[in-house]
Structure formats: C-alpha cells, structure tokens
Image (tube, rainbow, N blue to C red):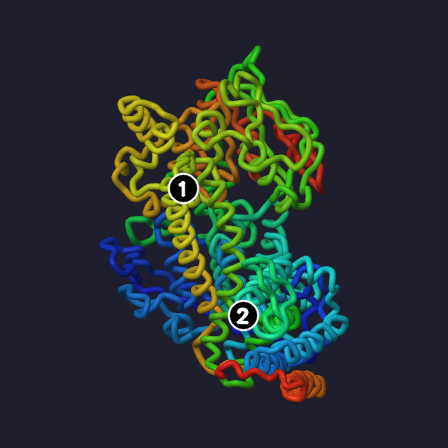
C-alpha cells in the first residue's frame, strides 16, 4: 500500500460561522502542525472542535452556507481542493457505513478518488490488516460489533491513503475493549504511515500517551493552550481551565457527593426470577436466567460487552418489553393499584413507577419547549396544574435548565439534552430510574452533575437507580451492585474497583 | 485479488434461503428476464398462459435454492389474495358456458370459473418474478450494473444504495421510538384521535431522526471523496454465459406462454 505523504496543517486567524447563526462556531484560531505530528484537540462542548475537524476534512464549504474567515491550509491548499488528503472518522459507527459488504465499504473511498481497480483491492487488504479486522470481504457490515464497525470505518479511511487522520471522538460510543482496539489500530497505522493525526476526545487518558502535542480551543475564540501533553495537562494554570471546560484529565480527583448512609429495611420493589429477555416477544433470547431483587434506594450497574443484551434487559426491567420467559414481579409497594406485571402497565401508570432514560435523548422528546417537556409526564400522571408548575420550576433549577425553559429541546447542547432527558423522568418521581448509557459522549462536567444528581435521588427520594453502562468510574461512584452480563448469562457482584479488575 | 473473488457471501435477502448460483448472473439480465415474463402475462388474461408461466417459474425453485414450503409460508398473504381474486372473478364474470353450480345468488359457470382461475394464477405468475429478484439480486451488484452498464449517474445510483441501507436502520429506529415514547407516558390516550396524534408525533420524530442520520451519512460519504471527481469501480459489472441462459429462459418462457395460449385458442388480449 502506498504510504501517503504526511500533511502539514496551517491555520491563520481561522474562523467559521454556520449559516443562520449569529455566533461564530470557531474564531481566531492560529496554529502550525508539522507533517507527522500527533495532536490531541480539546475544548469545552461547543468550542468548535468538530467544526474545525469537518473544515479540515473539506466537508465544510461555501455550498453548506457558512462563512469562513482567515485561512486554513493542508500543504498550502484549501481543504476542499485537497479532498482525499485527509480522512475523517466520526463518532457514530452506524451513520458512516455506506455499503453492505465489508470489502466494498473499504473500497468506497478509493473508488471515489479514482484509484485503479487492481490497486484498490491491494489497499483494501492492507487497510483491513492495519486495523486487525479479519473477516471475509463479503461479510455483512451490519453484523459487526460496535468496535469492529469503528475499525471498519478506520480501514475505509486508510484505503484512501490519507496524509492526515482526523478522528472526531472515535471511541465515545464504545466499550472499554473497543476503545483499546481503536487506539491500538490508530497507533499501528501512524507508526507505519507516519501520517499526521488530529484527534478530538473528552477522555484524555486513552490518548495522552499516543500524542505529542495538545491544542485546546477556547470557547470564546482563539486557543486556550498549545504544547506538549505533559505541560498542558499538568500545568496548574491550564489544568483548572481544562477542568472548567469539561475535559477528563488523567489523575484528576472527581469530587464525589457525600457517601450514602446504608438504607436499612428498604422495601422490595421489583423481583426477577429466572428472567429471559429478547428484543421481540418471539425472538431469540439474548439473556437467560436473570435472578435479581431491586430494593428502594438500590444502585445497580449493568455492564458487559456491546451486544450482550444489556439494553434489552433494561427495557424488560423497565416494563417496556415483555419477558420472553421467567418472572418479573412488581411488589405491592411498587405496583400499588396497577397489578404485578410491569409490561402490562399503561403508559401513565408506568411513568410514576419506573422511568427509563434512553441512550439517545432525542428519542424521548415529545414537545416544543423545555417547560412542556418537563410538564408532560406529571400532567399525564394526573397531577394538578399548580403541582406541575412547582415540579417544573424545581427541576429546571436543580438541573440548571432555568434559563432554557422556552427553548426547543432539539436545539440544546449534548449535555443539556442529557440533563433534560433525566429531568423529564424525575418529574413524575418514579420509584425506579433506569438509564441506558447515561454518560456516553458526555464531558466531565455533565458526568459529575449526573453522578451527584442520581446519588441524591437515591438518598433523598429512596429511588432505585439502575444504569446500563461501560463506565466503571460511574458505577464506582454510584456504588451498589454490578450485574455483569456476558455470553447470555448474568452475574451479580459488588461495585467497586475490584469489579472492574475481575471483569 | 480479482473482483470476481469478492462475490457476495452474505445471505440472500429472503431469510431462510441460501444464495443460489443464479446470483452470479448480472442483475440486468435477471431484471430483463423478469420483465419479459411479466409483460407476457400482462398481455393476456387466460389460464393457459398463466399456467405455463407459473410452471416455468416454479421449475426454477430448486435452482434458486428456495424451499417451496418456506416460500409458501412467506407469501401466504399473496396466496390468499390470489384465491380471493379468483373467487370474486368467478362470481362476477359473464355467466356463459355450462352451469356448474346454481345456488340462488351464487351462480358459477364453466367460463366464469375459468376466468377466476386465470386471474388467480396470473396474479401469482406476476408476483413470483419480483420475489425471485429479491432473492437473487444483491443491491450493490444492481447499483454496479446500473452505473457501469446502463451508464446511470453514479452519484444518483450510489446515493440511492446508501439510502436503502438507512431504511433498514429506520425500521429499528421506529421500534425504539415507540418504546421511548411509551416510557415517557406518550401513548396514554385511549381514544382513536389520541392514538392518531401519537402516531403522527412518532412519525415526525422518525422523520427528524432520518434527516439527522442522512445528513451525517452524507458528510461521511463526502469526507470519503464521494462526488468529487471521476470515480473508478472496485467491482466490474460483467456479463457471462449464465446471463445468456437467464435471458433465454425469460424470453423463451414468455414466448411459450403466448404461443400456448394462441394454440389453445384462449389468448385474450388485455385491451380487447
């Protein structure tokens, strides 16, 4: 495979304003990146990291309706004129796969660049070797795991032989093994090709060893810091500002909310007995023999590799899917007048008993404003208008959404959307709160807010919190128990540093 | 590595079936054969031509590696529709010929029953080629053939191909949306109007998600150089001897059907 020449990147007072927006997405950015340099790009949510990467990949242009200021050059050329010199890897594996067979997918970029046929297949094999994806070329792309899909996307970019790799939060949606797979693949590729790297990632720890420079964008324009990782990530001056910007710093202490007093004589809420779960009522069981009792104030983390059936289990516990086999019984304390089978509850009965927060907040938005969104559940549950008004105000204040009550939920930032989706579930004060990957793609600030909010909810309202997550720090911070899900069965263990090591 | 070695190993589109050797035919010849047969059945409404075509189609089942039982299970709505069509036609067609059954309003004659059988068989004879196409033709191969052989614009063909993959994802998304909204208390309304409004709301939510996904996919494709310059093709869309057989079978079956109907005197031109 032809090794591409590493690309030099130069920005001079560069800025971008999206069409129809008043504020600049990026402004006044200047830097020089020499060929072969490996750069970690940091900054608060909304500081314009993705915008900068998209511009470098040549997919932002006058035709997308934005306004460019200053200059941005790849080897002296405008990025749009240098298509194919840069390869962009995005966060969501599903929305960047174009074709249905692995070999075709990897070949797609090379085809677009007009590479001769014989050379395309050489490149395809080399790229798949580079990322260590050993499946037949005819393998279905839909049948790959999350980590494999992301490695496939990386291979698809490598087949274009780019001199500049742009990675936009490439591991935010992956389990810990998937994160390492991608990190190691990138390292192997860089060692071989010598390509320039710019990677955006909230969780610095996995990448800090691999990069030799850190650039931090300031949300107000310009750069906050620019230098070697040791300097930028450890210097007191930049550290505090990075923490403020929500960057995950290696070795930073996470300020935990005060530990919970052990709840004694808590009531049983939900009991699973030999529970068998499947995505569709008559579909294949993904998980069998789950035995579990949830008490008021419990914390339970459900962990395991991508595709092990964690989300399906959560949806079943949440009364949204019917169990395929076994028993799921609500205690009288939880069921009250509603009957002991959660999957038979009406929507309005469900919201006051079990709240399920989905992975994608947008899936659960129903109205046109934050206020209506918060009021929706309580109104459905039959609360009075004044009660609802109090709930909305209290929650908006507690989750720092007070200034946004008139805003359309879809226009909020990622962190705000996440807080709102949790708040909408808390509005009906359910006895059990289920969360599917609540910390995916969140910065350190939103992460801390979530942890402290959920811990308080357990302590003060006796709410049982169940979270499906890869995030060991999150389950450790919440305490309680871990349900390890793997190869069709589930195992309970206490949460804590040992749980991660044992897995 | 030759392009030929990259022939699809993935399973056929009809679950429960395996890919057949006919999948090696160029999608254009398969399409051409299906069109020829369909035109022949459309031309005439009679039981002879429909029977010939249907027999010719069913004879392909072993070659296509479709288990007749699997097929029946999957297309049972079609079988019922064909039976209902046949019955309705027999009931309403002109009552000429000998009377077979006369029970008050129910009057069946040889001619009306013949017309009914013709309609039922014809429906199946038209539907089967479509199902066979689903089983044998891979969407990517079809796109290759359309762009390389018929010279349709590659931007349009590949865009449509990528969009088709998204449709599959949207089916899953619709399910997730339904559960997510149920969890919020959205489907509490029991009235038909409430249900309808909830359905509209979910549809709108799906539309938003579809646009977001499509936008992200478009960015990903553009970042991989899509639509920037003259492109090459990793797979060549070629014709081989099997294409000759496929086309000959299609055209031959069409001709045989028309000839048989004419010879039996049952040919009944659709526009006459």
Which quadrant would residue A275 be assigned to in this image? top right
What residue is rendered at 58% in x and 40% in y? A311
> Which marked residue is nearer to the observer: mark 2 or mark 1?
2
Q: Nearer the viewer, residue A238 or A168?
A: A168
Q: Which mark is residue B260?
A: none
Q: Nearer the viewer, residue A17 or A78?
A: A17
Quick check: A99 above or below B247? above
Q: Secondary structure at mark 1?
A: helix
Instruction: Calculate the distance from the C-alpha at mark 2 to the C-alpha at mark 1.
Output: 42 Å
* Quarter of the C terminus of chain A within the rendering: top right
The percent coordinates of residue A304 (x first, y second) are: 64, 40
Q: Between disc 2 and disc 1, whose residue precedes?
A: 2
Residue A14 in view of the camera: yes
Which quadrant would residue B67 be assigned to in this image? bottom right
* Quarter of the N terminus of chain A within the rendering: bottom right
Using residue B79 as the reference point, say whether residue A409 is left or right of it.
left
Using residue A438 as the reference point, say whether residue B258 is left or right of it.
right
What residue is rendered at 64% in x and 80% in y? B49
Which residue is tagged 2? B93
Which residue is tagged 1? B195
The percent coordinates of residue A268 (x first, y second) are: 58, 17
> What chain does mark 2 sit on?
B
Q: Nearer the viewer, residue A98 or A330?
A: A330
> What chain does mark 1 sit on?
B
Asked if badges 2 and 1 are on one and the same chain, I answer yes
What residue is rendered at 57% in x and 57% in y? A150
The percent coordinates of residue A317 (x first, y second) are: 58, 32
Local crowd at mark 1 within 10 Å, few (<14), some, or many (≥20)? some
Quick check: A456 above or below B13? above
């Amino acid at each position: 495979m032809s090794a591409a020449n590493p690309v030099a990147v130069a920005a001079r007072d560069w800025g971008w304003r999206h069409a129809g927006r008043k504020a600049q997405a990026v402004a006044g950015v200047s830097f020089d990146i020499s060929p072969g340099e490996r750069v970690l790009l940091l900054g608060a949510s909304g500081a314009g990291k993705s915008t900068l990467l998209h511009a470098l990949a040549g997919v932002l242009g006058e035709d997308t309706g934005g306004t460019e200021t200053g200059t941005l050059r790849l080897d002296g050329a405008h990025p749009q004129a240098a298509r194919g010199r840069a390869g962009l890897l995005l966060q969501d594996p599903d929305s960047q796969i174009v074709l249905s067979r692995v070999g075709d997918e990897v070949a797609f970029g090379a085809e677009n660049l007009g590479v001769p046929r014989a050379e395309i297949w050489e490149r395809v094999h080399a790229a798949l070797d580079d990322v260590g994806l050993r499946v037949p070329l005819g393998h279905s792309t839909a049948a790959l795991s999350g980590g494999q899909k992301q490695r496939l996307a990386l291979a698809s970019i490598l087949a274009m032989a780019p001199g500049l790799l742009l990675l936009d939060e490439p591991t935010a949606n992956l389990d810990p093994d998937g994160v390492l797979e991608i990190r190691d693949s990138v390292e192997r590729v860089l060692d071989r090709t010598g390509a320039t790297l710019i990677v955006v990632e909230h969780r610095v720890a996995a990448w800090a060893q691999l990069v030799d420079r850190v650039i931090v964008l300031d949300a107000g324009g310009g750069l906050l810091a620019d230098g070697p990782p040791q300097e930028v990530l450890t210097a007191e001056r930049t550290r505090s500002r990075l923490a403020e910007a929500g960057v995950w710093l290696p070795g930073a202490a996470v300020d935990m909310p005060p530990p919970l007093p052990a709840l004694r004589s808590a009531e049983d809420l939900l009991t699973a007995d030999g529970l068998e779960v499947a995505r569709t009522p008559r579909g294949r069981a993904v998980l069998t023999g789950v035995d579990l009792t949830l008490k008021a104030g419990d914390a339970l983390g459900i962990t395991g590799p991508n595709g092990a059936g964690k989300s399906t289990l959560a949806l079943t516990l949440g009364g949204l899917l019917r169990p395929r086999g076994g028993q799921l019984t609500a205690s009288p304390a939880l069921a009250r007048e509603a009957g002991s089978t959660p999957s038979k509850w009406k929507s309005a009965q469900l919201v006051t008993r079990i709240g399920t927060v989905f992975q994608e907040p947008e899936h659960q938005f129903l109205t046109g404003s934050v206020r209506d969104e918060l009021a929706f559940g309580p109104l459905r549950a039959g609360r009075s208008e004044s009660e609802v008004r109090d709930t909305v105000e209290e929650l908006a204040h507690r989750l720092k959404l007070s200034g946004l009550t008139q805003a359309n939920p879809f226009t909020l930032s990622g962190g705000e959307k996440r807080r709102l989706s949790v708040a909408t579930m808390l509005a009906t004060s359910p006895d059990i709160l289920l969360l599917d990957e609540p910390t995916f793609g969140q910065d350190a600030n939103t992460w801390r807010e979530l942890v402290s909010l959920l811990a308080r909810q357990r302590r003060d309202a006796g709410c049982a919190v169940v979270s499906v997550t890869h995030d060991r720090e999150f389950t450790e911070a919440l305490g309680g128990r871990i349900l390890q899900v793997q190869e069709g069965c589930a195992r309970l263990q206490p949460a804590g540093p040992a749980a991660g090591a044992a897995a | 590595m030759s392009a030929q070695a990259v022939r699809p190993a993935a399973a056929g589109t009809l679950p429960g079936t395996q890919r057949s050797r006919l999948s090696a035919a160029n999608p254009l010849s398969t399409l051409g054969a299906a069109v020829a047969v369909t035109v022949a059945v459309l031309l005439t409404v009679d039981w002879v031509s429909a029977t010939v075509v249907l027999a010719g189609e069913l004879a392909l089942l072993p070659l296509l590696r479709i288990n007749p039982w699997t097929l029946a299970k999957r297309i049972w709505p079609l079988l019922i529709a064909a039976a209902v069509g046949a019955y309705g036609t027999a009931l309403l067609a002109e009552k000429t010929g000998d009377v077979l059954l006369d029970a008050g309003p129910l009057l069946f004659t040889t001619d009306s029953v013949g017309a009914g059988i013709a309609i039922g068989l014809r429906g199946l004879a038209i539907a089967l080629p479509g199902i066979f196409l689903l089983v044998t033709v891979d969407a990517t191969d079809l796109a290759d053939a359309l762009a390389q052989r018929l010279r349709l614009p590659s931007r349009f063909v590949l865009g449509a191909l990528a969009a088709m993959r998204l449709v599959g994802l949207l089916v899953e998304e619709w399910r997730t949306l339904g559960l997510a909204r149920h969890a919020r208390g959205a489907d509490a309304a029991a009235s038909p109007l409430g249900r309808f409004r909830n359905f509209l709301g979910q549809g709108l939510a799906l539309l938003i998600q579809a646009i977001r996904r499509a936008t992200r996919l478009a960015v990903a494709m553009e970042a991989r150089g899509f639509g920037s310059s003259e492109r090459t093709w990793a797979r060549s869309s070629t014709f081989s001897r099997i294409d000759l057989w496929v086309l000959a079978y299609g055209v031959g079956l069409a001709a045989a059907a028309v000839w048989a109907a004419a010879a039996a005197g049952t040919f009944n031109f659709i526009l006459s």
